[in-house]
């Protein structure tokens, strides 16, 4: 190769990278080419997470497992429980909306001799999902609402816990445990109450998303009047979607002001505002319910059972003590955690009352 050819090749290759000296650990220097591959110092995305973001991975993991384990819920099947009526109500609402009619003003003829079902049996959830189903298939809308409400419920628990002021880790831990609740009666906020093998309590499942937020915003409203409207909104929606769960939302408004001894008068005043606002807002549901009570359908099969009349305080306390209220047929892990949490709340509540009534002695 001639000298001129070498110069031409060097010109085509571009400027040559110069070697740069690098000080080694033994004090010597070595020349390292500038075009040598460098080892990246960037951390793995998981290692870049802040400590407060780590609990979110736990919530995401639980939701992912739920999505996989409950995937069969979206299959088209014939329901053998209350879900059959709920699905029929969604179909009825879908047809009503398609015709431009309000489902609550129509006679529901598909149960016994018929009744004003959407007035006396909380029809808001069925109307909402039915309206979505009118854009496609009401049956598909019902199945996917059941699936998504079950799968994503831990997110509602985490989110409401953060609204109440729980630390990120505590809210995430509560969310992670939420799918594992299991009671003897199988009608609580548990997966067995909503799946095909259970009672199919779909309306209660819808309300289970609203109740945590109703309690969370009620708790916030005790200290911040700006949260009163949101508390009224979620208490009202909870009662409109499911009457029995609505009782629990109203009960929280009565009890939460007493959980802290300081500024009791202010907290009671705001609780009264939440109660009054919620009572007025739910009148759109309660007034037609009472006006048409003589036409309400009676479930003669369940009317004498504990599902309607309750099991009694003695039985409920026994289930609580034996762990059957939260951990049916398994080790009472959640029951023990509930006990620890209740003891902690009771101690803090007692200390607050002591500071309220005997400030000079503390």
Image (spheres, rainbow, N blue to C red):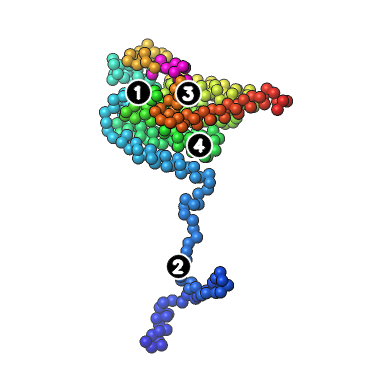
Q: Earlier in the sequence, mark 2 or mark 1?
A: 2
Q: Earlier in the sequence, mark 3 or mark 1?
A: 1
Q: How far, Cα to Cα, is label 4 from label 1?
A: 38 Å
Q: How far, Cα to Cα, is label 2 from label 1?
A: 69 Å
Task: Tell me which residue sits at (45%, 26%) in the image.
Answer: 323
Q: Which residue is mark 1?
A: 103
Q: Earlier in the sequence, mark 4 or mark 3?
A: 4
Q: How far, Cα to Cα, is label 4 from label 3?
A: 25 Å
Mark 2 crowd level (few <14, some 14–19, many ≥20, 10 Å Cα): few
Q: Earlier in the sequence, mark 2 or mark 4?
A: 2
Mark 4 crowd level (few <14, some 14–19, many ≥20, 10 Å Cα): many
Q: Which residue is mark 2?
A: 37
Outermost residue, bottom side: 2
Which element type, helix, strand or loop, lies under badge 2? loop
Task: Tell me which residue sits at (32%, 18%) in the image.
Answer: 107
Q: Which residue is mark 4?
A: 171
Magenta-drawn segment: 307-317
Q: Which residue is mark 3?
A: 321
């Amino acid at each position: 190769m001639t000298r001129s050819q070498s110069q031409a090749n060097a010109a085509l290759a571009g400027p040559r990278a110069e070697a740069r000296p690098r000080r080694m650990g033994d004090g010597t220097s070595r020349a390292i080419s500038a075009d040598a591959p460098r080892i990246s110092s960037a951390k793995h995305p998981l290692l870049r997470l802040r400590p407060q973001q780590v609990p979110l991975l736990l919530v995401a993991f639980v939701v992912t497992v739920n999505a996989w384990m409950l995937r069969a819920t979206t299959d088209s099947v014939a329901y053998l429980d209350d879900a059959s009526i709920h699905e029929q109500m969604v179909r009825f609402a879908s047809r009503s909306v398609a015709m431009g009619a309000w489902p609550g003003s129509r006679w529901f003829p598909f149960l016994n001799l018929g009744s004003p079902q959407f007035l006396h049996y909380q029809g808001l959830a069925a109307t909402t999902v039915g309206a979505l189903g009118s854009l496609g298939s009401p049956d598909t809308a019902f199945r996917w609402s059941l699936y998504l409400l079950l799968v994503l419920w831990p997110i509602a628990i985490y989110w409401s816990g953060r609204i109440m002021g729980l630390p990120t880790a505590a809210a995430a831990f509560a969310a992670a445990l939420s799918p594992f609740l299991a009671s003897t009666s199988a009608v609580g906020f548990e997966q067995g109450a909503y799946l095909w093998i259970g009672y199919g309590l779909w309306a209660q499942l819808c309300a289970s998303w609203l109740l945590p937020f109703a309690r969370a915003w009620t708790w916030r409203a005790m200290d911040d009047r700006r949260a009163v409207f949101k508390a009224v909104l979620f208490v009202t929606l909870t009662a409109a979607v499911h009457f029995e769960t609505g009782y629990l939302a109203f009960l929280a408004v009565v009890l939460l002001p007493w959980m802290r001894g300081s500024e009791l008068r202010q907290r009671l005043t705001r609780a009264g505002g939440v109660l009054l606002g919620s009572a007025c807002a739910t009148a759109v549901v309660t007034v037609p319910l009472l006006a048409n009570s003589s036409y309400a359908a009676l479930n003669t099969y369940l009317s004498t059972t504990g599902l309607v009349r309750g099991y009694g305080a003695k039985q409920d306390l026994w289930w609580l003590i034996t762990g059957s209220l939260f951990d049916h047929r398994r080790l009472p892990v959640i029951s023990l955690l509930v006990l620890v949490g209740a003891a902690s709340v009771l101690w803090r509540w007692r200390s607050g009352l002591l500071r309220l009534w005997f400030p000079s002695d503390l």
